[in-house]
Image (cartoon, rainbow, N blue to C red):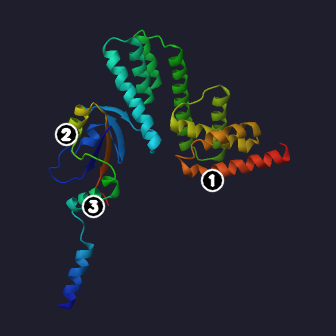
Amino acid sequence: MRLLAVLFALTALVRAETLEEKRDAKLKKPFVSAAPWILDYDKAREAAKASGKLVFAYFTRSYAG
Amino acid sequence: MVLFLHVTTRIEGEKYGDLLSEKGGTGFPWLVFMNPEGDVIAPHNDARSVAGFRRTLDRATRWSAAKAKADGGDKVARADMLFLETELGRMEVVDLEDALAEEGLEPDEAQRKWLLGLKANQQVDEIMEDLRRSRDEGSRRRLQGEMAGLRAAGSIPTGYYQRVNFWMLIAEHAAAGGDRALLKEAIPELRGFLAEIPGLGEPIKAFEAKLAGLEKTGS
């Protein structure tokens, strides 16, 4: 039983993060909260149209690593 | 400007999962300025600093303003638009010249100077491409000399990274050849980039030490 518990703990440690977890971890990075980023492309374009401003787009990814 | 952060997650069914490639990006991170319709106006090819982003934003804003005037038939604005597209890396210099000729747009004096700067940018890029491909010291020395040759011919680049590379190779050429005057010219130019590229600190110190040595020996 003890061996099983140890194996289970180890498995939990090495379990690969899901894509959702990686996305959530990315969105928790300090740079995201440091500026008023809009995460939705449609909403960003709406905001740009409403304000007459350009969109500064930063493309990144969360699925790697 | 509106700040838009797009995170490609590869989660099944994610909205706009291919937006990077649709907009012409090929790798991460990728920074661009778009108009409200989502058309890419300006990929960010300048320094990744506040000043660098401001320079790209300025070019993108000027392009948008020029386009609005050009759409109304303003030929000077149309020429400015083409120049800005070249500066933004959306057009090659040869295509700019062809477009100006085809549309009967005669560059004014400011635009002629602009064209010289853009040509110099291209020449610097070509030298740097050769440098990346070359492996031996002899080739490096030759390319440093070519860069110094551009300066001697008055071909001074206007692009941010082109200027950094230009003055760095010229400083290397001057240091290797013991050219005090040229080194004295190159060092302050490189110092101008230090705030945005702190990594230049060590090479600049080395060039300054070399200059001090040359001045001591009266070379």
Residue drawn 30% across and 57% down?
A64
Q: Which mark is residue B202?
A: 1
Disc 2 crowd rating (10 Å Cα; few below 14, some 14-19, many 20+) is some
Cα–Cα gap, marks 1 and 2: 46 Å
Disc 1 crowd rating (10 Å Cα; few below 14, some 14-19, many 20+) is few
Q: Residue furthest right?
A: B218
- Label 1 resides on the chain identified as B
How many numbered discs sit on the rendered protein?
3
At mark 1, the secondary structure is helix
Residue drawn 54% across and 14% down?
B109
Amino acid marked by disc 1: Glu
Position of the N terminus of chain A, as image quadrant, is bottom left
Up/down of B32 relative to B81, above or below: below
Q: Taking the image as drawn, is residue B179 in sight?
A: no
- Label 3 resides on the chain identified as A
Viewer-proximal residue, B158 or B126? B158
- Label 2 resides on the chain identified as A
Viewer-proximal residue, A47 or B90? A47
Amino acid marked by disc 2: Asp
**What residue is pinned by disc 3?**
A25
Viewer-proximal residue, A10 or B77? B77
- Residues tagged by mark 1 and mark 2 found on one chain of the structure: no
Cα–Cα gap, marks 2 and 3: 23 Å
Up/down of B161 relative to B79, above or below: below
Q: Taking the image as drawn, is residue B202 in sight?
A: yes
Left or right of residue B190, residue B40 in this image? left
| Tag nearer the camera, 1 or 2 | 2
Amino acid marked by disc 3: Ala
Q: Report which quarter residue B16 is drawn in.
A: top left
Q: Which mark is residue A42?
A: 2
